[in-house]
Image (spheres, grey):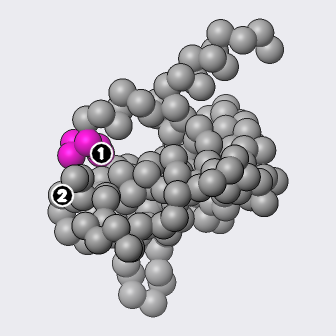
Protein backbone atom coordinates (compact mmCIF):
# COMPACT_ATOMS: atom_id res chain seq x y z
CA UNK A 1 0.00 0.00 0.00
CA UNK A 2 1.44 3.39 -0.95
CA UNK A 3 1.22 6.62 1.04
CA UNK A 4 -1.68 7.91 -1.06
CA UNK A 5 -3.89 4.93 -0.17
CA UNK A 6 -5.78 5.32 3.11
CA UNK A 7 -5.07 2.48 5.57
CA UNK A 8 -8.74 2.43 6.59
CA UNK A 9 -10.99 1.48 3.64
CA UNK A 10 -13.89 3.30 5.30
CA UNK A 11 -12.05 6.56 4.66
CA UNK A 12 -11.74 5.85 0.95
CA UNK A 13 -14.19 7.61 -1.33
CA UNK A 14 -16.75 5.32 -2.92
CA UNK A 15 -15.74 3.93 -6.29
CA UNK A 16 -17.44 5.73 -9.20
CA UNK A 17 -20.32 3.72 -10.61
CA UNK A 18 -20.65 5.44 -13.99
CA UNK A 19 -18.72 7.70 -16.35
CA UNK A 20 -20.39 10.90 -15.10
CA UNK A 21 -18.91 10.27 -11.65
CA UNK A 22 -15.41 9.86 -13.12
CA UNK A 23 -15.27 13.40 -14.42
CA UNK A 24 -16.50 16.77 -13.29
CA UNK A 25 -17.74 18.57 -16.41
CA UNK A 26 -18.83 21.53 -14.27
CA UNK A 27 -15.18 22.69 -14.22
CA UNK A 28 -15.08 23.05 -18.01
CA UNK A 29 -14.64 26.72 -18.82
CA UNK A 30 -13.24 27.69 -15.41
CA UNK A 31 -9.70 29.03 -15.71
CA UNK A 32 -6.68 28.33 -13.53
CA UNK A 33 -6.02 31.78 -12.09
CA UNK A 34 -2.47 33.04 -12.00
CA UNK A 35 -1.41 35.68 -9.49
CA UNK A 36 -1.44 39.23 -10.88
CA UNK A 37 2.34 39.43 -10.36
CA UNK A 38 2.98 36.32 -12.46
CA UNK A 39 0.57 37.49 -15.15
CA UNK A 40 2.23 40.94 -15.28
CA UNK A 41 5.77 39.53 -15.44
CA UNK A 42 4.69 37.04 -18.09
CA UNK A 43 3.45 39.92 -20.27
CA UNK A 44 6.99 41.30 -20.35
CA UNK A 45 8.05 38.20 -22.29
CA UNK A 46 5.24 37.89 -24.82
CA UNK A 47 6.40 34.72 -26.59
CA UNK A 48 6.57 32.64 -23.43
CA UNK A 49 3.35 34.14 -22.17
CA UNK A 50 1.45 33.19 -25.33
CA UNK A 51 2.52 29.57 -24.93
CA UNK A 52 1.41 29.52 -21.29
CA UNK A 53 -1.89 31.23 -22.14
CA UNK A 54 -2.53 28.62 -24.86
CA UNK A 55 -1.80 25.82 -22.39
CA UNK A 56 -4.16 27.28 -19.78
CA UNK A 57 -6.89 27.83 -22.41
CA UNK A 58 -6.73 24.16 -23.36
CA UNK A 59 -6.75 23.19 -19.70
CA UNK A 60 -9.83 25.37 -19.17
CA UNK A 61 -11.66 23.32 -21.82
CA UNK A 62 -10.93 19.99 -20.11
CA UNK A 63 -13.31 18.28 -17.72
CA UNK A 64 -11.76 17.05 -14.49
CA UNK A 65 -11.06 13.31 -14.33
CA UNK A 66 -11.54 13.08 -10.59
CA UNK A 67 -9.53 9.93 -9.91
CA UNK A 68 -6.56 10.88 -12.08
CA UNK A 69 -6.58 14.53 -10.98
CA UNK A 70 -6.56 13.65 -7.28
CA UNK A 71 -3.63 11.25 -7.79
CA UNK A 72 -1.58 13.83 -9.72
CA UNK A 73 -2.39 16.61 -7.24
CA UNK A 74 -1.25 14.37 -4.37
CA UNK A 75 2.02 13.61 -6.18
CA UNK A 76 2.63 17.30 -6.91
CA UNK A 77 1.79 18.27 -3.33
CA UNK A 78 4.21 15.62 -2.04
CA UNK A 79 6.98 17.03 -4.26
CA UNK A 80 6.24 20.54 -2.96
CA UNK A 81 6.39 19.48 0.69
CA UNK A 82 9.37 17.09 0.46
CA UNK A 83 12.85 18.46 0.78
CA UNK A 84 13.32 21.66 2.72
CA UNK A 85 10.33 21.97 5.00
CA UNK A 86 8.41 25.17 4.38
CA UNK A 87 10.45 26.14 1.31
CA UNK A 88 7.31 26.41 -0.85
CA UNK A 89 3.69 27.28 -0.09
CA UNK A 90 1.04 26.16 -2.53
CA UNK A 91 -1.10 29.07 -3.70
CA UNK A 92 -3.05 27.10 -6.29
CA UNK A 93 -2.96 23.53 -7.60
CA UNK A 94 -5.31 21.96 -10.10
CA UNK A 95 -5.35 19.02 -12.46
CA UNK A 96 -8.02 18.20 -15.02
CA UNK A 97 -7.88 15.21 -17.42
CA UNK A 98 -4.41 15.53 -18.97
CA UNK A 99 -3.05 18.82 -17.59
CA UNK A 100 -1.95 20.21 -14.24
CA UNK A 101 -1.05 23.71 -13.08
CA UNK A 102 0.64 24.79 -9.87
CA UNK A 103 1.51 28.13 -8.34
CA UNK A 104 3.84 28.21 -5.35
CA UNK A 105 5.40 30.99 -3.30
CA UNK A 106 8.75 30.99 -1.54
CA UNK A 107 10.82 33.45 0.44
CA UNK A 108 13.83 31.29 -0.40
CA UNK A 109 15.22 32.37 -3.76
CA UNK A 110 14.21 29.19 -5.56
CA UNK A 111 12.16 28.77 -8.73
CA UNK A 112 9.99 25.73 -9.23
CA UNK A 113 9.41 22.39 -7.65
CA UNK A 114 11.66 19.39 -8.32
CA UNK A 115 10.35 15.83 -8.45
CA UNK A 116 13.39 14.08 -6.98
CA UNK A 117 11.15 12.02 -4.70
CA UNK A 118 8.98 10.83 -7.63
CA UNK A 119 11.14 10.02 -10.68
CA UNK A 120 8.21 8.29 -12.41
CA UNK A 121 6.42 11.65 -12.55
CA UNK A 122 8.77 12.83 -15.31
CA UNK A 123 7.93 9.72 -17.32
CA UNK A 124 4.19 10.29 -17.33
CA UNK A 125 4.07 14.09 -17.19
CA UNK A 126 5.77 16.48 -19.60
CA UNK A 127 6.83 19.88 -18.24
CA UNK A 128 5.08 22.67 -20.12
CA UNK A 129 5.40 26.47 -19.95
CA UNK A 130 5.97 28.08 -16.59
CA UNK A 131 6.67 31.52 -15.29
CA UNK A 132 7.64 33.40 -12.16
CA UNK A 133 7.53 36.83 -10.55
CA UNK A 134 8.78 38.60 -7.45
CA UNK A 135 6.43 40.22 -4.99
CA UNK A 136 7.75 42.69 -2.41
CA UNK A 137 6.00 43.65 0.77
CA UNK A 138 6.91 47.31 1.42
CA UNK A 139 5.98 47.03 5.12
CA UNK A 140 8.19 44.04 5.94
CA UNK A 141 10.73 44.25 3.13
CA UNK A 142 10.18 40.55 2.44
CA UNK A 143 10.46 39.47 -1.17
CA UNK A 144 8.47 36.45 -2.25
CA UNK A 145 9.23 34.49 -5.39
CA UNK A 146 6.05 33.20 -7.03
CA UNK A 147 6.45 30.37 -9.51
CA UNK A 148 3.81 28.92 -11.85
CA UNK A 149 4.46 25.50 -13.36
CA UNK A 150 2.41 23.42 -15.78
CA UNK A 151 2.47 19.80 -16.93
CA UNK A 152 0.67 17.67 -19.45
CA UNK A 153 0.58 13.90 -19.84
CA UNK A 154 3.36 12.80 -22.15
CA UNK A 155 0.83 10.84 -24.18
CA UNK A 156 -1.45 13.84 -24.81
CA UNK A 157 1.53 16.12 -25.51
CA UNK A 158 2.87 13.71 -28.14
CA UNK A 159 -0.60 13.39 -29.70
CA UNK A 160 -0.88 17.20 -29.97
CA UNK A 161 2.60 17.46 -31.47
CA UNK A 162 1.71 14.83 -34.10
CA UNK A 163 -1.63 16.34 -35.06
CA UNK A 164 -1.83 18.99 -37.80
CA UNK A 165 -2.81 22.48 -36.67
Query: Circle 1: is it few (<14), some (14-19), or many (20+) Cα within 10 Å?
Result: few
Span of residues in magenta: 114-118
At 47% across and 81% down in the image, what residue appears? 137
Number of the label disc, if any, that sits on residue 114? 1
Residue 16, given in percent of the width and then of the height, sits at 59, 55
Extreme-left residue of the structure: 84
At 29% across and 45% down in the image, what residue appears? 114
Magenta span contains residue 117: yes
At 39% across and 57% down in the image, what residue appears? 74
Q: Mark 2 points at which residue?
A: 83
Q: Nearer the viewer, residue 48 or 25?
A: 25
Query: Circle 2: is it few (<14), some (14-19), or many (20+) Cα within 10 Å?
Result: some
Q: In this view, does 164 lie above or below 97?
A: above
Q: Is residue 115 above or below residue 161?
A: below
Magenta span contains residue 60: no
- As measured in the structure, the alpha-carbon distance from the residue carrying label 2 to the one carrying label 1 is 9 Å
Give the prevailing secondary structure in the magenta stretch.
loop
- Asked whether, in this view, residue 158 is left or right of residue 43, the answer is left
Q: Which of 162 and 22 is in front in this view?
A: 22
Q: Quadrant of the C terminus?
A: top right
Q: In this view, does 47 lie above or below 59?
A: above
The local secondary structure at tag 2 comes to loop
Residue 47, given in percent of the width and then of the height, sits at 67, 32
Q: Which of 123 and 146 is in front in this view?
A: 123
- Asked whether, in this view, residue 146 is left or right of residue 6, the answer is right
Q: In which quarter of the image is residue 10?
A: bottom left
Q: Do the residues labelled 2 and 1 touch (CB within 8 Å)?
A: yes
Task: Mark 2 or mark 1: name the one nearer the start of the chain.
Answer: 2
Residue 131, given in percent of the width and then of the height, sits at 53, 47
- Asked whether, in this view, residue 13 is left or right of residue 123, the answer is right
Q: Can residue 152 be seen in this view?
A: yes
Q: Which of 21 and 79 is in front in this view?
A: 21
Amino acid sequence: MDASTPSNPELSPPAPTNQSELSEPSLVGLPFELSPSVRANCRLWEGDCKEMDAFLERMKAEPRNTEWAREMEARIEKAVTSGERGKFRIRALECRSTRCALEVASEVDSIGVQFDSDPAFDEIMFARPGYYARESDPQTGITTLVSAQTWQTTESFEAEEDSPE
